[in-house]
Image (tube, rainbow, N blue to C red):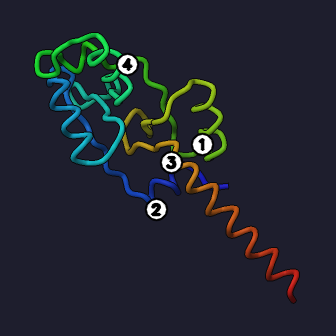
């Protein structure tokens, strides 16, 4: 089974981030421009939190707050569930299910090296299963 490191090596290590004191409007704009559902929040280059479309919907839109006047810090989650490079895709799926999160920042010795999503994990599992099926079909026909 694939590890988080293998997944990141295939998908890339790009981390989209925003500052805690930036506006929620800037965060939502960046998510829309990059077609992603979350951003890691950095302070002094270190992981401080995560902001997702769900945070926006529940803590800004539904509460009638103003996106330009609300900071990321006000709505972000500062209790971030993270993954590490040697974890397996299955372990991460279990963590995401248990903690009800869709994105995991990946830390290697406290250094942020990427972010994986539930979609990344599903794609990896489907790819692994497709490979196994092809191998079994080859074995059966020979």
- Name the front one of labels 4 and 2: 4
Q: Residue at x 24, y 16 (%)?
A: 73
Q: How far separated are the C-alphas under marks 2 and 3?
A: 14 Å
Q: How far separated are the C-alphas under marks 4 and 1?
A: 23 Å
Q: Secondary structure at mark 2?
A: helix
- Name the front one of labels 4 and 1: 4
Q: How far separated are the C-alphas under marks 1 and 3?
A: 17 Å
Mark 4 / mark 1, whichever is N-terminal = 4
Say which mark, if any, is on residue 87. 1
- Name the front one of labels 2 and 3: 3
Residue 93 on image: x %, y %: 62, 39
State which quarter of the image contains the C terminus: bottom right
The residue closer to the viewer here, 49 or 43, is 49
Say which mark, if any, is on residue 119. 3
- Name the front one of labels 1 and 2: 2
Quadrant of residue 139 within the rendered picture: bottom right
Mark 1 / mark 2, whichever is N-terminal = 2
Say which mark, if any, is on residue 77. 4
Q: Residue at x 31, y 15 (%)?
A: 62
Mark 1 / mark 3, whichever is N-terminal = 1
In the rendered image, the residue lying farthest to the left is 68
- Name the front one of labels 3 and 4: 3
Quadrant of residue 12 within the rendered picture: bottom left
């Amino acid at each position: 089974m694939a590890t988080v490191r293998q997944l990141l090596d295939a998908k890339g290590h790009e981390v989209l981030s925003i500052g805690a004191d930036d506006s929620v409007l800037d965060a939502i704009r960046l998510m829309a421009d990059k077609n992603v559902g979350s951003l890691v929040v950095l302070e002094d280059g270190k992981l401080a939190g995560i902001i997702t479309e769900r945070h926006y919907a529940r803590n800004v839109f539904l509460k009638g707050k103003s996106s330009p006047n609300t900071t990321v810090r006000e709505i972000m989650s500062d209790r971030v569930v993270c993954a590490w490079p040697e974890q397996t895709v299955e372990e991460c799926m279990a963590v995401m299910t248990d903690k009800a999160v869709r994105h995991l920042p990946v830390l290697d010795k406290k250094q942020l090296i990427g972010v994986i999503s539930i979609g990344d994990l599903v794609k990896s599992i489907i790819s692994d299963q497709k490979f196994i099926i092809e191998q079994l079909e080859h074995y059966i026909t020979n």
